[in-house]
């Protein structure tokens, strides 16, 4: 995402329009549209990808609605609530010690669904033997108790989830991370705590993406 200081332009934009000529350098932006530069009464936040002076827009972001913007409206670049929250979440994650690396040896399990055959998938319970894990996050002592997998068959296509959990003797602030493992790249997860227990969970992962026998590394990086 890019920012630019003190940028504002007049704008006329139809409701539902998804492209707009803008005087911005190429890049990705979060922009705000208002009905006046001096006394605005309504706003819309848009995500914009600018290429060669033309922006491709995703309308009505961050709880705002796709609206008609007549003559007198303006579009500008400013810090939005969601952008600021993403920055704060990343700072929280960095304060927790940066990258978390957990290694397991996955295990083949009998009785697994046929589309998971040979993948080390287990319907409920552990999916491997822990080899190594951090003993602290951001200087706060933790223990990793396990890595488990679950299956959701409520829909027509089974979906799977991964849970990493443990205990701690201190308070771990909630923070956003990205989980990567064989078959999964940058899956959003949030570090959560309930009393002395903490956990990271990723849900609704596609079938057939878990692991064969052997050493597996799960990497969790600040989002």
Image (cartoon, grey):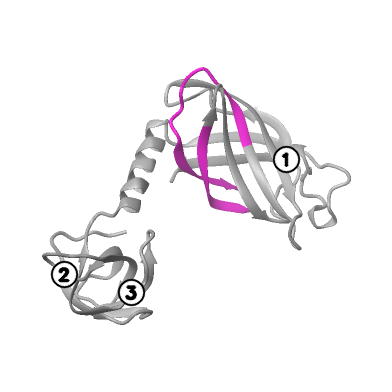
Q: Does 118 sit left or right of 58 as displayed?
A: right
The residue pinned by badge 1 equals 214
Identify the secondary structure beneath mark 3: loop
Q: CA distance from mark 2 to mark 3?
A: 14 Å
Residue at image location 15% in from the left, 59% down from the top: 5
Tags 2 and 1 touching, CB below 8 Å: no
The residue pinned by badge 3 equals 67
Residues in magenta?
164-192
Could you say which is closer to the camera, residue 14 or residue 182?
14
Q: CA distance from mark 3 to mark 1?
A: 54 Å
Residue 98 place in picture, x, y as percent: 42, 35
Q: Is residue 82 visible?
A: yes
Identify the secondary structure beneath mark 1: strand
Tags 3 and 1 touching, CB below 8 Å: no
Identify the secondary structure beneath mark 2: loop
Residue at image location 73% in from the left, 35% down from the top: 128
Label 3 CA crowd tier, 10 Å (few <14, some 14–19, many 20+): some
The residue pinned by badge 2 equals 36
Q: Does 111 sit left or right of 86 as displayed?
A: right
Query: Image quarter for residue 209?
Result: bottom right
């Amino acid at each position: 995402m890019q920012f630019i200081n003190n940028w504002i332009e007049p704008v006329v934009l139809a409701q539902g329009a998804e492209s707009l000529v803008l005087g911005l350098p190429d890049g990705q932006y979060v922009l705000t549209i208002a009905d006046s530069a001096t006394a605005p009464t309504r706003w819309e936040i848009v995500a914009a990808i600018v290429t060669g002076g033309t922006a491709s827009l995703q309308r009505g972001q961050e709880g705002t609605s796709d609206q008609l913007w007549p003559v007198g409206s303006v579009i500008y670049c400013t810090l939005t609530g969601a952008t600021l929250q993403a920055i704060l979440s990343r700072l929280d994650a960095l304060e927790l010690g940066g990258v978390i690396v957990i290694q397991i040896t996955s295990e083949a399990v009998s009785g697994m669904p046929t589309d998971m055959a040979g993948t080390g998938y287990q319907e409920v319970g552990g999916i491997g033997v822990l080899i190594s894990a951090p003993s602290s996050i951001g200087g706060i002592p933790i223990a990793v108790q396990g890595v488990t997998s679950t299956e959701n068959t409520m829909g027509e296509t089974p979906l799977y989830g991964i849970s990493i959990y443990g205990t701690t003797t201190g308070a771990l602030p909630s923070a956003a991370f990205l989980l990567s493992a064989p078959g999964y790249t940058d899956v959003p997860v949030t570090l959560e705590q309930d009393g002395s227990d903490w956990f990271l969970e990723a849900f609704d992962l596609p079938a057939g993406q878990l692991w064969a026998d052997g050493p597996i590394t799960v990497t969790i990086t600040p989002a």
